[in-house]
Amino acid sequence: MRLKSSFALAVSLSLLAVGKVAAQDLGPNIHKLKDGIYVYVGKDRPNDAGPESNVGIILTQEGVVLIDTGQNPTDARAIQAAIKKLTSQPVRYVIATETHGDHHAGDFVFSPPGVSIAHEGSTAALKDREPADPARVERLRAGSPEVRAALEGYHFVLPQAEYRQKMTLNVGERTFELLYMKNAHSEADTAVWLPKERVLFSASVVVNNQFNVIRPWVGIPDILAATKMLKGLNPEVVVPGHGTPGTVKIFEDMERYYALLLDRVGAMVKAGKTLDEIKKELQMPEYDQWMTKNRIPANIEAAYNAVVGRLVFKDN
Ligand SMILES: [Zn+2]
């Protein structure tokens, strides 16, 4: 009896000593990927808007590295509270995977002291945002008491360090490889690869189970080149910019989708259809279960540009 209770005490003390926190104690959106590697999975949105952005939380012996800071200030505060349960160490670095605001809502919560790192061009893309819409934060504050509280101490954050093409960041026992992806989604997209742990944060070049936003300067060939590069890393875990984390299957699904889209648009171009006709007539029933269907016309336009570009190239 006495032995048993001292054993129980020893077990509970050893648990205490290593500071184990079960993922379920960290809030409903945080999932453990590997020891010390967590993801805050963005919440689902109504009206087929697709899920909000994901955030990577990586503990090291020398502090925390964050990958993006959330869709809303309230997400950032939930992440901040979870980090406090996991470690007494500060956030050392904040890596931005893209320039869009839905990945930057909590920058002010973590930086400083976290050093904000992004690819070259991010500062230029971000710096006009606040002056262009000075009332944005006031509007957010007026939204709800929770958001108002989450915005306490708000200040506008720009990257403190920009890298070009590739950067290796060593923090404690971990290595982070920052990989630039050209014209893949925003003005400056960064994938973050942890080679020892085989975990990849792919940014929004790929999303899971939904049609992606494709802006006019983004090309499907560039998206496919980035996807191929990421797949070539042979990751075990893939965390997309939005949507449920998974495996390389996320890349394979996207590749299959774009191949089919290019095929169908190509056949219609060859049959003499205009872009408007293709937008009206093209069906992709295989993807009926995917979210964000309002993005299909932009996907068709990107495929049309890729197909026409390819034909022009071939003819010349
Ligand atoms: Zn984006």
Image (cartoon, grey):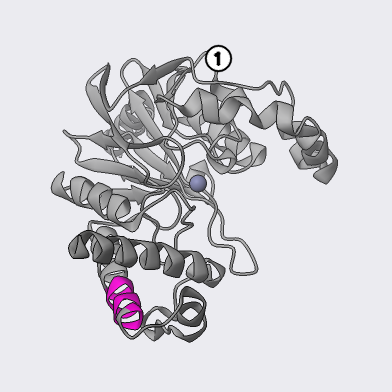
Residue 100 position (above or below residue 297): above
Q: Quick one: SS at disc 1?
A: loop
Q: Residue at x 28, y 55 (%)?
A: 221
Depth check, front residue: 111 or 35 = 111
Query: In the rendered structure, which amino acid carries the disc numbered 1?
Result: Pro
- Name the spot of residue 228 as percent of width and height, x first: 20, 51
Q: Residue at x 23, y 63 (%)?
A: 252
Locate the N terminus by quadrant: top left
Q: Which residues are magenta?
A: 260-269
30 inside magenta stretch: no
Q: Is residue 268 magenta?
A: yes
Q: Residue at x 34, y 32 (%)?
A: 15
Query: Quick one: which residue is furthest to the right in this view?
Result: 142
Is 25 placed above or below 166 here? below
Residue 84 visible in the current orientation: no
Q: Nearer the viewer, residue 25 or 285?
A: 285
Determine whether 271 is above or below 308 in the image. below
Question: Is 235 left or right of 162, judged from the image as shown?
Answer: left
Whether residue 277 appears in this view of the structure is: yes
Q: Count neighbours of disc 1 (C-alpha within 10 A) and say few if under 14, some if 14 to 19, many if 20 or more.
A: some
Q: Residue 98 falls in which quadrant of the image?
A: top left
Q: Nearer the viewer, residue 270 or 24?
A: 270
- Answer above or below: position of 153 versus 179: above
Nearer to the camera, 70 or 38: 70
Which residue is identified by label 1? 112
